[in-house]
Image (tube, rainbow, N blue to C red):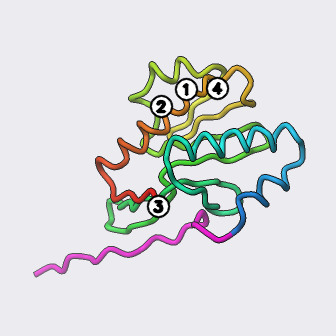
Amino acid sequence: MSKKAASKKVVIKTTKNDSSVIEYINAMESQQVRDDARVLLNLFVDATGASPRMWGASIVGYGEYVYYRANGDQGLMTATGFSMRKSGPVLYIMPGYSDYQSLVDELGPHKLGKSCLYLKNLNGVDFTAIRKLIKLGVKDLQKNHEVSMS
C-alpha cells in the first residue's frame, strides 16, 4: 500500500505582514511615484472592496488565495495587487492576462508577464480597463482557488 503524501505549506518570501501600506508609499523617492501609488491604492480598493495589506517588502495586496502545487504543497498569496518598481508600476492579476486580450488592448502602453502587467507610469492608462481586469482576475481566481477578499 502506498501512503498519500500530506500537503505541506510552502514557505515563500512574499508573505502577508503587518507593515504599513501608507509608510511604504510615503517612502517612495518621487512625488509622482507616490501619487501613482495612491491612485492604484484607491483603484484596487474600489475594484475589490478589500483592504490593502503589504505582502513582502513591496507588494500592496488585496485579498488572498490558497494555491496547490502538483506535488501537493500549498501556499498563500495575494489575490491581486500592485508594486511600485523603479521601472514603473506592476499590477498582479494572478490568473494571468491571456483571457483578457480585448481589455489589455485598451490599457495603453504596457508589457505583459505571466501574471504581471508592467507600466512605465499611469499616463495614458485606461483606468476603466484596469478596474475591469482586477474584477475579472479575482472572479476567475475564485473558480479554481479558495479566495478570501477580507
Q: Which numbered tag is attached to residue 132?
A: 2
Dot 1 falls on a residue whose secondary structure is: helix
Question: Can you identify the residue that label 4 sits on?
Answer: 110
Task: Name the residue type under label 1.
Answer: Thr
If you read the primary sequence from the N terminus, does the residue marked by circle 2 or circle 3 appear first?
Answer: 2
Dot 2 falls on a residue whose secondary structure is: helix
| In the image: residue 100, left or right of residue 115 | left
Quarter location, residue 123 = top right
Dot 3 falls on a residue whose secondary structure is: loop
Q: Is residue 143 magenta?
A: no
Instruction: Verify CB contact (< 8 Å) between mark 2 and mark 1.
Output: yes
Eyeballing the image, is 85 above or below 123? below
Question: Can you identify the residue that label 3 sits on?
Answer: 150
Given residues 96 and 141, the one toward you in this image is: 141
Question: Can you identify the residue that label 1 sits on?
Answer: 128
The magenta segment is 1-18
Task: Give residue 95's position: percent from left, percent from top.
Answer: 42, 42
Crowding at label 4, few (<14), some or many (≥20) Cα neighbours within 10 Å? some
**Which numbered mark, 4 or 3, is in the foreground of this view?**
3
Could you tell me which residue is drawn at 60 percent across and 28 percent down? 127
Task: Give residue 126's position: percent from left, percent from top.
Answer: 61, 23
Could you tell me which residue is drawn at 53 percent across and 33 percent down? 131
Task: Give residue 74's position: percent from left, percent from top.
Answer: 39, 67
